[in-house]
Amino acid sequence: MNTESTREREIRVLLDAATADRIRGRVADAEQLLEEALAIARSEDRPELVAAVRASQGVLERNRGNLDSANVALAEALDLRRQVADPLGIARALGDLGRVHLDAGRSSEASRCIEEALETSSGPEPGRTRAEILENAGLLHARLGSPDRAEECLLEARSLYDQLDDVDAVDRIDAFFHRRDREAGRGEGPAVGLDEELQLLERRRLLEALEAEGWNQSRAARRLGVTETRVRNLMRRHGLRPRNRRGRPRKSADRSTV
């Protein structure tokens, strides 16, 4: 095996580890791993690898709320992926960049990126990239006041996530529709009230604890400072199904909390 392929594998391992750290909230560790991966990718003069690392850095910065830094990283990733003519990579970078613009309140830029991403990702085998772009498109149209288009995009995204067995994403979209229906029933418009904001915070904290502890309910309870019974009740309240340590739903007969 040549040195180049070994270095590429090393970068992929670092990217996977950084993603795992980001999901678990270990931001500093993720940042360090990505800096290491970037140094290797630049030394190898491999634009496609640099693009992958910069895209991961952009997502990390967006999650941290550093939208300007996220914009710079994702714009570089997009330029590099255009250079190497990587359609799926281009679509992914456009989708991530569109989400940054959306978070920053730049609706026109978000719309331009996401629409191009949808067009670029419309291949014969849509997967996670297409699902994520559709979800971002749905959020964009909801914010722009186009509920029918938003629903169309989100339902298609949900279908793809369901095929991918991504229960987190399915739950997230279901929560969006549930929230929308509740708001429509109360006639409150798009504003989120205090009770709903607290519910969203509770659900997010619960998910973070479960994911950090490999979906072990007793350890998640200790992390949250509550009883295991409370965790089970919260999971039922928020529609979260028990899963194994890989995050996949358990069979109905499997009641353990490994």
Image (tube, rainbow, N blue to C red):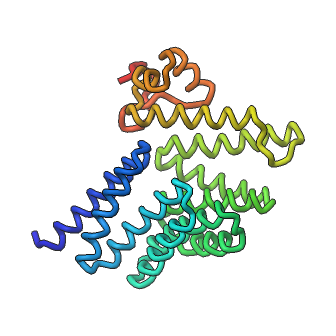
Q: In the rendered view, does 7 fall on the left or right side of 36?
A: left
Give the position of the C terminus as an image quadrant: top left
In the image, residue 227 lies at what x, y percent?
50, 15
Q: Residue at x 43, y 63 (%)?
A: 57
In the image, residue 50 lies at what x, y percent?
34, 73
- The correct choice, above or below, for 226 with respect to 201 in the image is above
Q: In the rendered view, does 73 fall on the left or right side of 103?
A: left
Q: Residue at x 45, y 32 (%)?
A: 210
Give the position of the N terminus as an image quadrant: bottom left
| Total tally of numbered discs in the picture | 0
Which residue of the protein is positioned furthest toward the right in this rendering? 187
Residue 123: in sight, yes or no? Answer: no
Which residue of the protein is positioned furthest toward the left in this rendering? 1
Q: In the rendered view, does 158 fall on the left or right side of 225?
A: right
Residue 167: in sight, yes or no? Answer: yes
Residue 179 found in image quarter: top right
Asked whether 217 or 152 is in front, the reply is: 217
Q: Residue at x 16, y 66 (%)?
A: 6
